[in-house]
Image: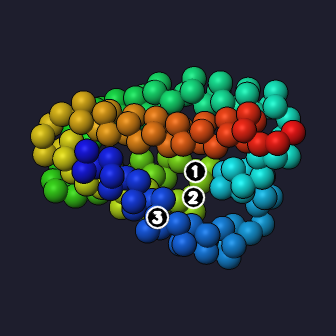
Amino acid sequence: MTCVIWLFVIPFVVFAPLDDYLIENVFSWLPDWFFQARFMENLGQYSTASLLLMLILLWVVAVPGPLTEELYYRGYLLPRMSRLGKWAPLVNAVLFSLYHFAIPWQNPGRIIGFLPMTYAVWWKKNVRLGIIVHCGVIVISFLLQTLGIVALLFLSPA
């Protein structure tokens, strides 16, 4: 549970100002639609059908995506990095973060956010811990996004 809370607080609260700074100053050349936060702020401009399709797709990847990432990064790759010793979890967390190449402004928060969980998986030699934490965070995050979209679709005045 501590890892789940850590994964919410670090990337989404502590590093949110850094994400905004990087978006505005380093990645400002990207179009506005590229940024998820701006998408969530402007939900009203999308059709109901588009939002419902997005919700369906969101939930289709809610568990298989992070499950696959954990099986590869913590289940397969991390044990094979043993020659790096205590640095293996750090290198693994950095590689995992860089793999999310479509959202590079989140790398600092993602690395710091996933580092305790990666060290816990490495120390306990139990990938199930990573699967539970990662899938849990994604499901909670997607649930919050779903609530925002559902509120817009069904609770806002027409």
State the CA–CA distance, disc 2 to disc 1.
5 Å
Residue under the point 75% across and 36% down: 153
Q: Position of residue 88 (x, y in %)?
A: 24, 52
Residue 129 left/right relative to 32: left
The reply, left or right, for residue 27 in relation to residue 93 is right
Residue assigned mark 2: 104
Q: What label sits on residue 137 in the rendered view?
A: none
How would you rate the neighbour count of disc 1 (Cα within 10 Å): few for under 14, some for 14-19, many for 20 or more? few
Q: Which mark is residue 13?
A: 3
Q: Position of residue 17 (x, y in %)?
A: 54, 72
- Comparing 115 with 87, the one in front is 115
Secondary structure found at label 1: loop
Q: Dot 1 corresponds to which residue? A: 101
Q: Badge 2, how many Cα within 10 Å: few under 14, some, many 20+? A: some
Quadrant for the C terminus, please. Answer: top right
The quadrant the N terminus occupies is top left
Viewer-nearest of discs 1 and 3:
3
Residue 144 occupies quadrant:
top right
The mark that comes first in sequence, 1 or 3, is 3
- Left or right, residue 135 beside residue 51: left
